[in-house]
Image (cartoon, rainbow, N blue to C red):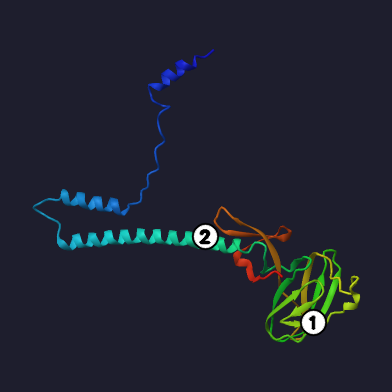
Amino acid sequence: MTDVSGVNSALSQYDIGNKKPEENKSNDLGKTEFLELMIAKLNNQDPLKPQDDAQFIAELAQFSTVEGIQNMSDGFAELATSYKSSQALQASALVGGAVTIDGNDSSQLRYGELVFGMADVPAGADELYLQIEDEFGQIVEDVPLGYQGNGELTFKWDGANLEVNGELMDIDYSKFETDENGNIIPHPAGEYTFRIQGSVLGQAQSLDVAMSQRVDSVTILSSNDIQLNLAGGKTATMADVRQINAVY
């Protein structure tokens, strides 16, 4: 058997076990080091050939520049940290609410809640209609929107009623079942896809639709970016949010 204690004794004379890793030293010249170099230079200058005033003033100006750059860098770092903290706080306030996301054309309908959508209508658009498709690919609504001026179009849907730019659309309510009190039973909860189609300057065209999703949680990534975790397993960044919606 190897004598471990003997090996340890042999190594101890070189103090291998007690040596600490050397700290990484920066090659950057900070304001303290710069000032120390200036003082050392003054102490060791030739008294018969002292440094002229112009050169000394130039070095002082250089010192001020070094100090200013370092202070500015520290200020930007503090500002970035403050901004990220503010953004994280704002994002956490969205949990439980709904946000409209660019590039997202589907939304999860929950009983008693609204889904929100928006689209940009180009000039010359006509004969627009909104199609709503359930998660099984069946079109459950095909609603004419009539004339809509160019610009932003917004809508809300609760599974039965559709409001476009603040105006209720004509819906065929006869296809809905009713409860014992005669109230309409809306479409069941689930994932629905929304499409707006029509004619633009005489050509058939589909408009890009942005739909809402509920925010389930927020994650701060290793890059310090904020990630919104949405219902249905989707994710988005704060830059993707087009509108923050109230949940009724």
Label drawn at residue 169? 1
Amino acid type of the residue tagged 2 in the rendering? Ser
Residue 199 vs residue 228: left or right?
A: right
Label drawn at residue 85? 2
Distance of label 2 from label 1 (alpha carbons):
43 Å
The image quadrant where one finds the C terminus is bottom right
Q: Residue furthest left?
A: 48
The image quadrant where one finds the N terminus is top right
Q: How many dots with numbers?
A: 2
User: Which circle's residue, 2 or 1, is located before the other in the chain?
Assistant: 2
Q: Residue at x 82, y 74 (%)?
A: 160
Q: Quadrant of residue 173?
A: bottom right
Residue 91 vs residue 118: left or right?
A: left
- Local packing at callout 2 (Cα closer than 10 Å; few below 14, some 14-19, many 20+) is few
Indicate the position of residue 63 as horizontal and vertical percent values.
Answer: 27, 58
Residue 210 vs residue 55: left or right?
A: right
